[in-house]
Image (cartoon, rainbow, N blue to C red):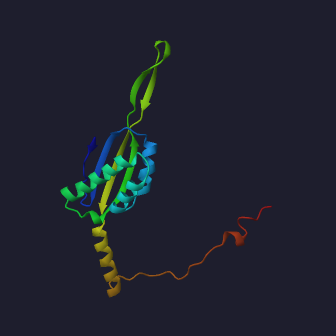
Amino acid sequence: MIKKRKRNLSTEVYALGQHICMSAHKARRGIDQIRRRSYEESLMILELMPYRACYPILKSVYSAAANASHNMSLNEANLVISKAEVNEGTAVKRLKPRARGRSYLIKRPTCHITIVLKNISLYKEFEEYMVYSKKSGLITKKKNKNLTCHDTYSSGGLWDKK
């Protein structure tokens, strides 16, 4: 089941996949590869990775992009995965019959996947404004020219004891 929700900020969009039958540790392998990447680049990475966890993550990324384009009219080329996290969910408990009428408990772990996409077109416009302001002389920045490098090894502070 995939729930969709969005934050009040105008540039972030959420997609939340809950109760996915998979260990959170295994799902984090795929999530760690796509964090802080663009939307299109993360799709290519997830499609080519051989892990089973990549399919639910791919669905969540698609869902977040669909939320961004439908609810907020954002362009998918300007989206970046700003936050991607996997949390542990409840464990599904089953009983497996064993010898002599006994039963063993089998726990199937679940996880919750959260994908947050951020629109970077506003940041690009801000950077273009800053470059224009620096060229025109509106913004000046003092530079400290007294930079000294302290070498720990040559000063004897690290290796003075024998």
User: Which quarter of the rendering shows the N terminus?
Assistant: top left
Task: Give the image quarter of residue 121.
Answer: bottom left
Residue 89 place in picture, x, y as percent: 38, 37
Q: Residue at the spot x=37%, y=59% of the render?
A: 44
In the depicted structure, whether residue 70 falls above or below residue 114: below
Foreground pick, 22 / 145: 22
In the depicted structure, whether residue 79 falls above or below residue 116: below
User: Which quarter of the rendering shows the C terminus?
Assistant: bottom right
Q: Residue at the spot x=40%, y=39% of the render?
A: 22
Q: Residue at the spot x=33%, y=75% of the render?
A: 127
Q: Evaluate whether residue 8 shows in this view.
A: no
**In the image, 105: left or right of 125?**
right
In the depicted structure, whether residue 119 falls above or below residue 96: below
In the depicted structure, whether residue 1 falls above or below residue 50: above
Residue 83 place in picture, x, y as percent: 36, 55
Q: Evaluate whether residue 69 shows in this view.
A: yes
Task: Give the image quarter of residue 148.
Answer: bottom right
Q: Residue at the spot x=32%, y=87% of the render?
A: 136
Foreground pick, 57 / 124: 57
